[in-house]
Each structure stands twice: as structure tokens, then as C-alpha cells.
Amino acid sequence: MNFYPHHIGDFDKATRHLTRLERSIYRDLLDLYYDTEKELPLDTSWICRKVIARSNEESTAVEQVLNEFFTETPTGWYHERCEEEISKYHANTSQKSQAGKASAASKAIKKQQALNGGSTAVATPVERLNHGTSTNQEPLTINQEPKKKEPAAQAFVLPDWIPAETWAAYCKVRTGKKAKNEPHALGLIVKDLEKFRQAGHDPVDCLNGSIKSGWAGVFEPKTLGTFAQVKADVAKSTVSLNPDVEATRRRIEADAAIPRNGPTLAVLERMAELRGHRQAA
């Protein structure tokens, strides 16, 4: 043992009746017992040499202390308190040794996980101890293969035929976030807008209609149906995508813009005639 607890009060109470020489001899005998971690031999001359008791007075003090505080057994001089402390010391040392081995094993596991890309799942030292597994065994792995990295998301590129301002306004209505926060979903929306463009329609009108109506979810990929269904939904909620309907709408607007000079004279005469017939009736 490298050290042992010394209870000053207990020692002073037990040795108050001894002489200064006997108290000193007793401490030397305790140190010798703890150092060898076993009973002191029955050879008194050997003990005297170890504690440097050379004079007759010192040798007598050794014998008196042994007889009073130690128990003579066939294997040596036995001290109960010393044996208790030695047992505690070995138990504590064993626990620290196991903890040290567990700590070293844990560090080795973390190093192996770092080398494997963090994919190796192993039993912790505490789990191995709880299951009666020695920490000297190889780590128990669940998956030895390194974890495959997920493919990097492709950068979202806005087509030239969609104005950046219109797209930013649409994304704000749709998600309340910037377009770069949903590159995959927005990419699908642009893909469907490309179908409208190839069909001869203006996708910018579709975006403006969605922004105006607030129904930006018309191109929601999770609910996106067939091209015909999406076309019908956009027609109902934003602007018409039918060229004939658009032509009719333009003719009506143009006709309404023509200045009018009032009814002709013939019309006024006919209106007066109708009023007369109504009064006569």
C-alpha cells in the first residue's frame, strides 16, 4: 500500500497510556504491516531490524506493543484494523482499475468510430461490464460498414424566362421564405411552369395570378395532379389559359373602350313613339 488512513483521535485514545518510545514503535509497526500487506512474521529479531529497534529498551517496547495490539497466530502477528484497511484498499484499487480499463476502451471506441466515419455502433464499457463481458475483448460492432454520405442537393437555378422579382414575390406568398430554402419543391414547380410555357401559355401570368389570389399552393408538389388538372385549377383561381377565351375578353374590353356619342335621331324618335303608346294604354 502506498498510503493508509490514520485516524488521529482513535490512535491517540488507544495509545494514551504508552510511553513516547512505545507510541513511536507502534507507528513503525503499522507502517511495516501496511507496506507488506500481510501479517508480521513471528521472528521478533526480524521485526526489530525493520523498525530499527537496536537497544534492549527498544526491543522490549516492540514485544510489548506486539502483545498488546496484535494477535499472535500460527502465520504471524495479526492486526484486525490493518486487515480491514488493506481489504478496502484492494477493493477500491480494483474498481479504479476497471474504471480505467473502461475509460481506455471508450477512448479506443471513439477513435475507431472517427476512423469509420462515425457509423460503428459498439457496446459501451459500462454495458459490457453489466453483461459480464471483459473490456479486453474486441468491440462488439453492429455495422462495420462506413456510413454512406447523402448526395448533395443540386443548386436551384431560376430560368431566364421567369423574372426574379416575380419569383421572389411568389415564393413569399407560398412559403414566407426565400426560394433557396426549398430548392427541391420549387424546382418541381418550375418544371411544371415549363410545361405551361411549352403549351403556349405565359407562366409569368400564372405566377402573378397566384400572387394576386394568394393561392400559391396551386403548384404544391404533394397535391400536384395531372397536367390537365393543374391547368384547370389555374384557370379557376388565377387567369384563363384558353386562347379563345383570352381573345373574347380582349374584344369585349376593346369594344367597351370605343367612345359613344349617344343614340341617333331615329332611335330617339322610336323611343318617343314607344312612350306615347305606353301613355295611351
Image: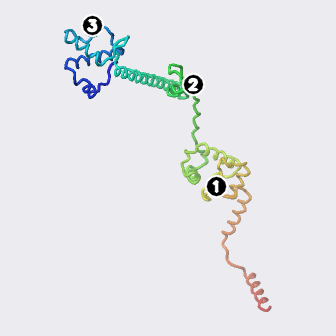
Quadrant of the image containing the C terminus? bottom right
Element under label 3? Answer: helix
- Position of 111 relative to 75 (above/below): below
Q: Amino acid at mark 2?
A: Thr
Tell me which residue sits at (69%, 68%) in the image.
255
Q: Of 112 and 12, which appears nearest the observer?
A: 12
Pointer 3 residue: 45
Compute the Cα span from label 3 to label 1.
113 Å
Disc on the earlier residue, 2 or 3? 3
Asked if residue 98 lies left or right of residue 211, the reply is left
- Label 2 environment density (alpha carbons within 10 Å; few <14, some 14–19, many ≥20): few
Q: Of 45 and 218, which appears nearest the observer?
A: 45
Image coordinates of residue 272 in percent, x first then y, are 75, 87
Asked if labels 1 and 3 touch by Cβ distance under 8 angstroms, the answer is: no
Compute the Cα span from label 2 to label 1.
59 Å
Q: Amino acid at mark 1?
A: Asp
Pointer 1 residue: 205
Q: In the figure, residue 35 lies in which quadrant? A: top left
